[in-house]
Image (cartoon, rainbow, N blue to C red):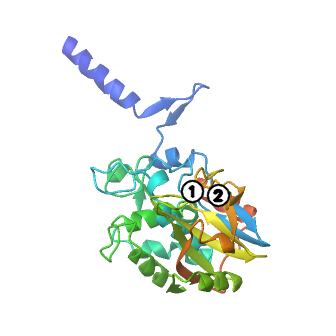
Amino acid sequence: MKSSWKKRFIIFVMLLCIWVYIPDGKMEEAKTEEDRLKERPSATRVVYICRNTYLYYAQNSPEWENLVIDPDPASRRVFGESACVVTALANCIVNAVSVWDLDRILDMTMYPVRIDSHSAVNARGVRARDKFEIRNLSDVVRYYPLIIGNYAGGNNRSGVRNRKNEDFYKRVLDAYQLEWERNTEWSEAVQALKDGKLVIACSGGRHSVISSEGHYFLLVAWADGYIYALDSYLRDRFPLDREQWIEILEPGLLRFHETDASRIPVQSRFIVTPSTDRTVYSKALLDDYIARSDRHE
């Protein structure tokens, strides 16, 4: 008899674990991985630069900064510290194409893109059946850097397995049918910015005032001799920049004089021509996509 009651009690506890109580006494279904991700604060926003608007993603946005980005089980690298390469590309593409084309990346992956509150790659985190699978355009807009990271981490048909290898840039840019060129000539990069193009750039080495280990970011505009950039890392200071060559206009948005590029130093990597039908984002438009994402639309 005691054994029977014990079994019943265990079953009751197991069923109770499927539900959680909320303060008003009602019962609510346990949170999903999608719920856990979407309840986190976000640094994604629309910024205004030289009379233009740009959608801005930060690799260390609170909603994903601690997500594992490497499919290798031995790796502890997370998005916030290791995703500047994919975030720079995400910032470039989202501001270079029509939002209606943004989900084209989902056709390039080998498997559905599945993320969770612990991992941005399919191979790690919770069980596959419990992961949040990205399908809707609203979720693509909301989590685009994670999708790029998921692709670069091995979920692709091209054999790419290194998010720090620029070769995956070419495949993604080609998939969106964007005009691009690999470039290391600073004068050409400056002219490209004057012509309305985007430039993916980097800085690194022992003389860099940005990062000795290397850091990628997006140059978006030129005005009155100044270069304006979207920093992949959200910050309000550069401790190594003792000469203050870099001016932080607001966290994530910076500028520097074109003649100081060699001092920082900044190196051009890719010049990308935005499509003629690229989406011009506004706060209202971004808020609308976030609201749709919350409604699972």
Which residue shows up at 56% across the image and 59% down it?
A: 210
The answer to whether residue 295 is visible is no
Crowding at dot 1, Cα within 10 Å, few <14 / some 14-19 / many 20+, comes out as many
Of the numbered discs 1 and 2, the one sitting upstream in the chain is 1
Q: Which quadrant of the figure contains the C terminus? A: bottom right
Which residue shows up at 60% across the image and 50% down it?
A: 239
Which residue shows up at 58% across the image and 65% down it?
A: 141
- Against 41, is 210 above or below? below
Secondary element at tag 2: loop
The residue pinned by badge 1 equals 233
Instruction: For the residues labelled 1 and 2, say whether their Cβ atoms are less than 8 Å apart.
Output: yes
The residue pinned by badge 2 equals 252
Residue 137 in picture, x, y percent from top left: 55, 67
Kind of residue at badge 2:
Gly
Residue 90 in picture, x, y percent from top left: 53, 68
Secondary element at tag 1: loop
Q: Residue furthest top?
A: 2
- Against 225, is 276 above or below? below
Residue 209 in picture, x, y percent from top left: 57, 59
Q: Which quadrant of the figure contains the N terminus? A: top left
Q: Quadrant of residue 13?
A: top left
Residue 194 in picture, x, y percent from top left: 71, 83
Kind of residue at badge 1:
Tyr
Crowding at dot 2, Cα within 10 Å, few <14 / some 14-19 / many 20+, comes out as many
Which residue shows up at 74% across the image and 61% down it?
A: 283
- Against 160, is 133 above or below? above
